[in-house]
Every structure is written in structure tokens, then in C-alpha cells.
Image: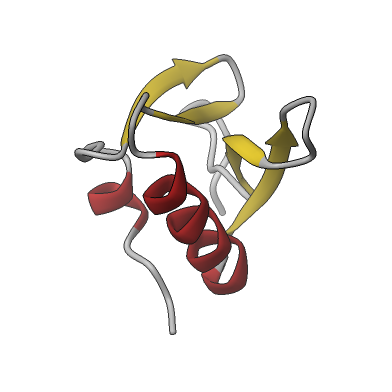
């Protein structure tokens, strides 16, 4: 199963999205921790075309995800 990255980056009730320098940071919203962890597992399993790095809290539970595209075409790249 693949996950549509554009839909994921819209955010949702259990998580918010921050545009980071080289990717995006998804963070769990307070009161929705279990739903965010379930989403994080699904995103990690379905990663296709992007890298997912789970960031964990002091109790070793995922509370943030960093998502970076694997290959991004530059607007200034030469084309043949």
C-alpha cells in the first residue's frame, strides 16, 4: 500500500505538519497520541518515494515523524 504524500501533508485531527528545510515534520496532537502512533506505523510501512525517520520521546514512543523526499528534481537542473 502506498500513501499519498500530498494528502498526508494536509494534517489531520491527530497530527499537525511543519514545513522543514529538507522535508516535513509531523507531530502528534495532545490527546491523540495513540492515533498518531498508529498513523506513524502506517506511514513508515507505506513509505514510497520518501524517507521516514521516527523521532521518539523519553519513553521510546514515536511522537514526531520527519519525512523527506528521496529524489527531488531541482528547477534549475539541466535537461537533455
Of residues 44 and 37, the one drawn nearer to the viewer in this rendering:
37
User: Residue 1's image quarter?
Assistant: bottom left
The residue located at (43%, 46%) in the rendering is 36
Image: 53 above or below 47: above
> Does residue 65 appear anywhere in the picture?
no
Please provide percent x and percent y for residue 52: 65, 49
- 77 with respect to 15 (left or right): right
> Does residue 47 appear anywhere in the picture?
yes
Q: How many marks?
A: 0
Of residues 3 and 28, the one drawn nearer to the viewer in this rendering:
28
- 36 with respect to 49 (left or right): left
Please provide percent x and percent y for residue 2: 43, 76
Task: Find the residue positioned furthest to the bottom.
Answer: 1
- 32 with respect to 36 (left or right): left
Picture quarter with the C terminus: bottom right
Image: 71 above or below 62: below
The residue located at (71%, 43%) in the rendering is 53
What colour scheme was applied to this rendering of the protein?
secondary structure
Image: 19 above or below 27: above
Please provide percent x and percent y for residue 10: 22, 38
Please provide percent x and percent y for residue 62: 65, 42
The residue located at (47%, 28%) in the rendering is 27
Of residues 39 and 76, the one drawn nearer to the viewer in this rendering:
39
The residue located at (32%, 62%) in the rendering is 4
Amino acid at each position: 500500500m502506498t500513501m499519498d504524500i500530498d494528502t498526508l501533508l494536509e494534517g489531520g485531527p491527530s497530527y499537525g505538519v511543519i514545513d522543514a528545510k529538507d522535508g516535513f515534520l509531523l507531530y502528534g496532537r495532545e490527546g491523540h497520541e495513540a492515533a498518531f502512533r498508529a498513523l506513524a506505523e502506517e506511514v513508515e510501512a507505506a513509505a514510497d518515494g520518501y524517507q521516514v525517520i521516527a523521532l521518539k520521546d523519553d519513553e521510546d514512543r514515536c511522537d514526531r515523524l520527519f519525512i523527506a523526499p528521496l529524489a527531488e528534481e531541482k528547477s534549475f537542473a539541466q535537461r537533455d
